[in-house]
């Protein structure tokens, strides 16, 4: 289970005296295990994505506000640490192919009115392995016949 891997990595960071990684993973574990001591991988991935999105937002604010380079580097390091816990991400052509496979597997007609059905089915088949915003744009394009 992914949570076990994160726990092991936190222990390794503790032994290596990597305070940044130890603290980041500790907070991630605490949040992910708040409701369930042994959350499933989908739940953990959801929390990892939330942490990454928060760190990216912090990075955007720091870049606009001219934050110190060391703080920006620390924030980027957080993102790099967290990214290793996500499954390989589908993007571009591979994501479009996955959407077309979902249309076939679920026998969904390629009509704009089926956007919700396609997104739900995509989530069921490829949970955590794509960016929702990118998928939404591709689904719209495919269903409208533009892609």
Image (spheres, rainbow, N blue to C red):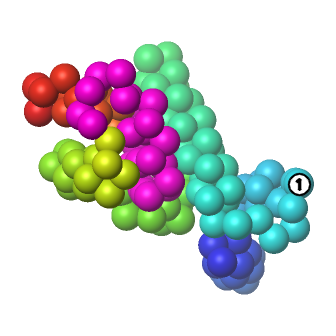
Residue nearer the viewer, 41 or 126 = 126
Q: Nearer the viewer, residue 38 or 54?
A: 38
Name the residue at 38% across, 29% down.
Answer: 115
Q: Residue at x 53, y 65 (%)?
A: 85
User: Split into 4 quadrants, where in the image is the N terminus?
Assistant: bottom right
Secondary structure under badge 1?
loop
How far across and how far down the image is residue 60, in percent? 46, 26
**On screen, residue 43 above or below 37:** above
In the displayed orientation, state which residue is furthest to the left: 146
32 or 25: nearer the eye?
32
Q: Is residue 26 above or below residue 104?
A: below
Q: Is residue 75 visible?
A: no
Magenta-drawn stretch contains 125: yes
Q: How many marks?
A: 1
Q: Is residue 130 magenta?
A: yes
Residue at image coords 26%, 53%? 104
Residue 76 placed where, x, y %?
47, 46
Is residue 97 left or right of 4 when viewed as pictured?
left
Residue 8 vertical placement versus 21 (above, below):
below
Q: Is residue 26 left or right of residue 134?
A: right
User: Is residue 5 among what the camera can see?
Assistant: yes
Q: Position of residue 8 (x, y in %)?
A: 69, 81
Instruction: Name the spot of residue 93 as percent of width and height, x first.
Output: 16, 49
Point 39% across, 39% down: residue: 118
Residue under label 1, please give it: 35
Q: Nearer the viewer, residue 17 or 42?
A: 42
**Magenta segment boundaries in residue numbering:** 109-133
Magenta stretch secondary structure, dominant: helix
Q: Is residue 87 left or right of residue 97?
A: right
Q: Is residue 103 above or below residue 53?
A: below
Question: Which quadrant, please, contains the C terminus?
Answer: top left
- Bin the neighbour count of mark 1 within 10 Å (Cα to Cα): few under 14, some 14-19, many 20 and up: few
């Amino acid at each position: 289970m992914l949570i076990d891997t994160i726990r092991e990595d936190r222990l390794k960071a503790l032994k290596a005296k990597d305070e940044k990684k130890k603290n980041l993973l500790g907070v991630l574990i605490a949040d992910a295990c708040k409701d369930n001591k042994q959350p499933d991988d989908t739940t953990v991935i959801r929390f990892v994505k939330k942490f990454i999105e928060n760190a990216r937002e912090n990075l955007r604010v720091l870049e606009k506000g001219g934050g110190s380079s060391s703080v920006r580097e620390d924030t980027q390091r957080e993102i790099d640490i967290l990214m290793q816990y996500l499954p390989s991400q589908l993007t571009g052509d591979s994501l479009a192919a996955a959407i077309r496979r979902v249309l076939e597997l679920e026998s969904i007609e390629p009509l704009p009115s089926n956007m919700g059905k396609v997104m739900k089915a995509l989530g069921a088949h490829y949970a955590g392995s794509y960016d929702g915003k990118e998928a939404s744009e591709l689904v719209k394009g495919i269903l409208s016949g533009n892609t």
